[in-house]
Image: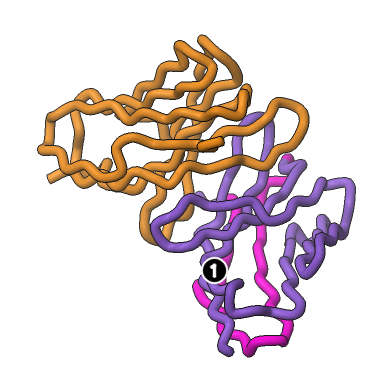
């Protein structure tokens, strides 16, 4: 059973606008959440993370929000750029194990 | 620094054949992981290691074995390949207690016919 879900397989956004990628989880034992970006034929690269004791973390154009009561996190990219076009995975940690969502393919239209 | 490297990049096996995937990292990371990625499934953890000489099962360990004889290397073995093991395999590594972010290799695309 998928413990981390990304229900939107794809998202298209105009350049300069905000991209919002969503992720839901079911396991209340998750204590750390991460977002990765993946280009075709490459491995994922780390983007941003958040501890379960926080509700927001910012890094430049990227902000992650965590709503523990709703078991929901989101990644905001502002402003979106064509180079942001990639597949984005959310991941959650419990113990030494990580669980990944199925990914959302973001296309930023110039 | 090369980061995380994986060998080979591509491989085609016949059912029942065996092979070993090699992962190497030059960042002195304690933790290493093997994942598989299948369409519509995201990345799933196969096995991981928290240090040289130690390994543990992940979410989908059946049909795979691993070894971590040296800190910088993590090997994934398939003793008798099955078509269900057709996948893209990613290796990753991370620091212990510093950050939970993982550094991934470029992947190995394995096809079992």
Colour purple, chain: A
Q: Measured along the vertical axis of the image, is residue A80 above or below residue A30? A: below
Q: Is residue B46 magenta?
A: no
> In which quadrant of the rendered view does residue A35 lie?
bottom right
Instruction: Give x and y (percent) for residue A23.
Output: 65, 63
Q: Is residue B105 left or right of residue A76?
A: left
Front-most of residues B24 and A5: B24
Mark 1, secondary structure of its residue: strand
Q: Is residue B89 left or right of residue B26?
A: left
Q: Disc 1 sits on a residue from what chain?
A: A
Q: Colour of chain B?
A: orange
Query: Quadrant where the C terminus of chain A lies?
Result: bottom right
Instruction: Give x and y (percent) for residue B3.
Output: 54, 37
Instruction: Give x and y (percent) for residue A78.
Output: 76, 77
Q: Residue at x 67, y 42 (%)?
A: B101
Q: Residue at x 48, y 50 (%)?
A: A43
Classed neighbour count for the residue bearing mark 1: other residues with Cα under 10 Å, few (<14), some (14–19), many (≥20): many
Disc 1 designates what residue?
Answer: A104
Q: Measured along the vertical axis of the image, is residue B75 above or below residue A48? A: above
Q: How is the image coloured?
A: by chain
Q: Residue at x 66, y 47 (%)?
A: A92
Q: Is residue A10 magenta?
A: yes
Specify the segment rendered in magenta: A3-29
Instruction: Give x and y (percent) for residue A93.
Output: 67, 41
């Amino acid at each position: 059973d998928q413990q981390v879900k990304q229900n939107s397989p794809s998202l298209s956004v105009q350049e300069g606008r905000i991209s919002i990628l969503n992720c839901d989880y079911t396991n209340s034992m998750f204590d750390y959440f991460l977002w990765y970006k993946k280009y075709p034929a490459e491995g994922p690269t780390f983007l941003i993370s958040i501890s379960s004791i926080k509700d927001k973390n910012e890094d430049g154009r990227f902000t992650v929000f965590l709503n523990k009561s709703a078991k929901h996190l989101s990644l905001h990219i502002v402003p979106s750029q064509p180079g942001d076009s990639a597949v984005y995975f959310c991941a959650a940690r419990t113990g030494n194990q990580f669980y990944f969502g199925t990914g959302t393919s973001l296309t930023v239209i110039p | 620094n090369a980061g995380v490297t994986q060998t080979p990049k591509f491989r085609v096996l016949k059912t029942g054949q065996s092979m070993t995937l090699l992962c190497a990292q030059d960042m002195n990371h304690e933790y290493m992981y093997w994942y598989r990625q299948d369409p519509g499934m995201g990345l799933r953890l196969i096995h991981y290691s928290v240090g040289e000489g130690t390994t543990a099962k992940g979410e989908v360990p059946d049909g795979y074995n691993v070894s971590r004889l040296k800190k910088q290397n993590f090997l994934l073995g398939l003793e008798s390949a099955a078509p269900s093991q057709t996948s893209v395999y990613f290796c990753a590594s991370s620091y212990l207690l510093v950050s939970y972010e993982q550094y991934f290799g470029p992947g190995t695309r394995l096809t079992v016919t």
